[in-house]
Image (cartoon, rainbow, N blue to C red):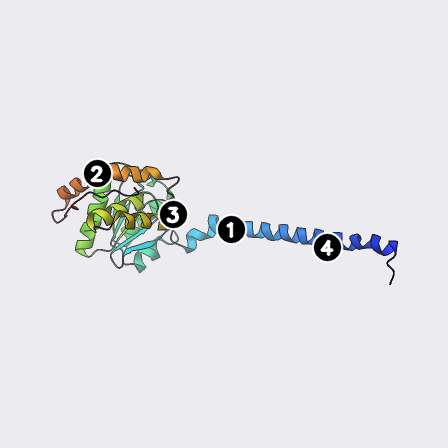
Amino acid sequence: MKTTDKDVATEPAVQQPLSRKLLKLALILCACIATGVLIWEELLEDRVVAKRFGVVEPGKIYRSGQISSYLIEPVLSENKIEKVIALNGSDLQKPYLKTEVETAKKLHIDHQVLYLIGDGTGDVEDYAEAVAEIMRCEKAGKPVLVHCAAGAQRTGGVIAAYRMLVQKKTPEEAYQELLQYDWNPHKDQALIDYLNQNLTRLSSLLEEKIEWYEPPATIPVIGK
């Protein structure tokens, strides 16, 4: 069958609207996905998921970021937490941390606030107190939750110090655990430098605070 000029001319007219419809559909789909992600991250996630919640030692030691007002009571209750160590003391007047303090009081949970800096650095005395308190809680059989704002830097640093100095885990094991909780080696090197500069002093402070603490034979070096 012979194709006429009229037939050829009409084919693009059929195809062009279809391609435009597909493009519009793709744009609408992308917009819906982006909106859904935004709604999840900004409005729903903190109501459903406890930020970076993790188990350090089952039934004994837990870690997290700042848990929202919607979840703090069930998380503390369900995990039978008896002690909370908040490393983000500079956030004490923010709603979530204020609610946490009030909830701990309501549940008769001991609550301690320490003041480390967002990049995981800070006063080594506060680091030592955090690690020492974890040791005290573990010895007393009191489940403890350690947290900061994001649950990656300050919390990661304290848990890494605990792993290496108290549990005698290898630096590589401690480093891998940092990565599991979204610590970024390309952006957050200050934490590694801080730990390596202060682990010796931290170990000495633990000897002063905890009579049963046994320092490692060699002070570990992490991330090298």
At 23% across and 45% down in the image, what residue appears?
Answer: 130
Could you tell which of marks 4 and 1 lies nearer the N-terminus?
Answer: 4
Q: Three-letter amino acid code at disc 4? A: Leu
Residue 88 at x, y percent in the picture: 32, 42
Could you tell which of marks 4 and 3 lies nearer the N-terminus?
Answer: 4
How far apart are labels 4 and 1 at the CA level?
29 Å
Could you tell which of marks 2 and 1 lies nearer the N-terminus?
Answer: 1
Could you tell which of marks 3 and 1 lies nearer the N-terminus?
Answer: 1
- The reply to whether residue 190 is in sight is yes
Q: Three-letter amino acid code at disc 3? A: Asp
How far apart are labels 3 and 1 at the CA level?
19 Å
Element type at mark 2: helix
Q: Which mark is residue 182?
A: 3
Q: Which mark is residue 18?
A: 4
How far apart are labels 4 and 2 at the CA level?
68 Å
**How crowded is the residue under tag 3: few (<14 C-alpha within 10 Å), some, or many (20+)?**
some
At 30% across and 58% down in the image, what residue appears?
Answer: 77
**Left or right of 109, for residue 206:** left
At 19% across and 39% down in the image, what residue appears?
Answer: 200
Q: Nearer the viewer, mark 3 or mark 1?
A: 3
Pick the quarter of the image with the C terminus: top left
How far apart are labels 4 and 3 at the CA level?
44 Å
The residue that label 1 is drawn on is: 37
Element type at mark 4: helix
The residue that label 2 is drawn on is: 125
User: Do tag 4 and tag 2 residues touch (Cβ < 8 Å)?
Assistant: no
